[in-house]
């Protein structure tokens, strides 16, 4: 066997061994790029790490302190050294924006709104 053939076979053997190394480890080793597998949505939602870091947060209603289960909302994935971000209010309670909608979109005046409220329409 010639030296060229021996070198080719040695390269082929090294390539074959490299194929048994998982792709992420090969890419990370070759390029120094940190990588990880992509999680499924269910895996991400169930992972306590995301809740601990508040990347996923429980969903609340504006008028309640108890979370809506199994509701979650996205949090802010970045932490600041100056402290935590303020806690956001939950979603608006039913009817919270009625007056604004009725006045601006339906052109109802205050008297008409009061009449509708008195009659139990809204």
Image (cartoon, rainbow, N blue to C red):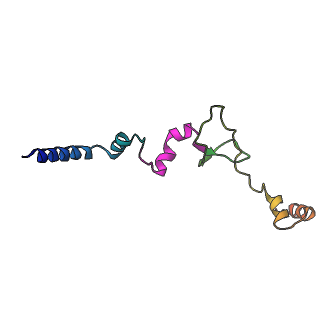
106 left or right, relative to 19:
right
Kindly identify the residue that appears in the image at 26 percent across and 44 percent down. Answer: 18
Residue 121 in view (yes/no): no
* Magenta-colored stretch includes residue 40: yes
> Farthest residue in the front direction?
3
- Relative placement, left or right, of 96 versus 59 is right
Left or right of residue 53, residue 107 in this image = right
Classify residue 109 as left or right of residue 16. Answer: right
Residue 119 x, y percent position in the rendering? 87, 64
Inspect this view and state whether residue 15 appears. yes
Identify the residue at the far right of this view. Answer: 111
51 in the magenta segment: yes
Name which residue lies at 87% across and 66% down: 108
* Observer-nearest of 76 and 15: 15
Instruction: Give the residue furthest to the bottom.
Output: 106
Residue at image position (81%, 66%) is 105
- Does 111 appear above or below 32? below
Numbered range of the magenta stretch? 36-57
Residue found 87% across the figure and 64% down from its top: 116
Residue that lies at the very extreme toward the left in this rendered image: 1
Quadrant containing the C terminus is bottom right
| Residue placed most toward the observer, 26 or 49 | 26
Count of residue discs:
0
Q: Residue 17: image x %, image y %?
A: 22, 43
Residue 85 lies, in percent from the top left, at 67, 38
């Amino acid at each position: 066997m010639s030296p060229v053939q021996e070198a080719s076979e040695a390269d082929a053997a090294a390539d074959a061994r490299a194929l048994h190394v998982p792709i992420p480890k090969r890419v990370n080793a070759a390029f120094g790029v940190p990588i990880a597998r992509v999680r499924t949505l269910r895996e991400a939602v169930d992972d306590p790490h995301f809740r601990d870091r508040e990347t996923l947060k429980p969903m609340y209603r504006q008028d309640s302190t108890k979370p809506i289960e199994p509701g979650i909302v996205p949090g802010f994935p970045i932490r600041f050294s100056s402290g935590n971000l303020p806690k956001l209010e939950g979603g608006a309670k039913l009817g919270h924006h009625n007056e604004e909608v009725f006045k601006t979109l339906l052109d109802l005046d205050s008297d008409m709104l009061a009449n509708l409220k008195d009659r139990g329409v809204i």
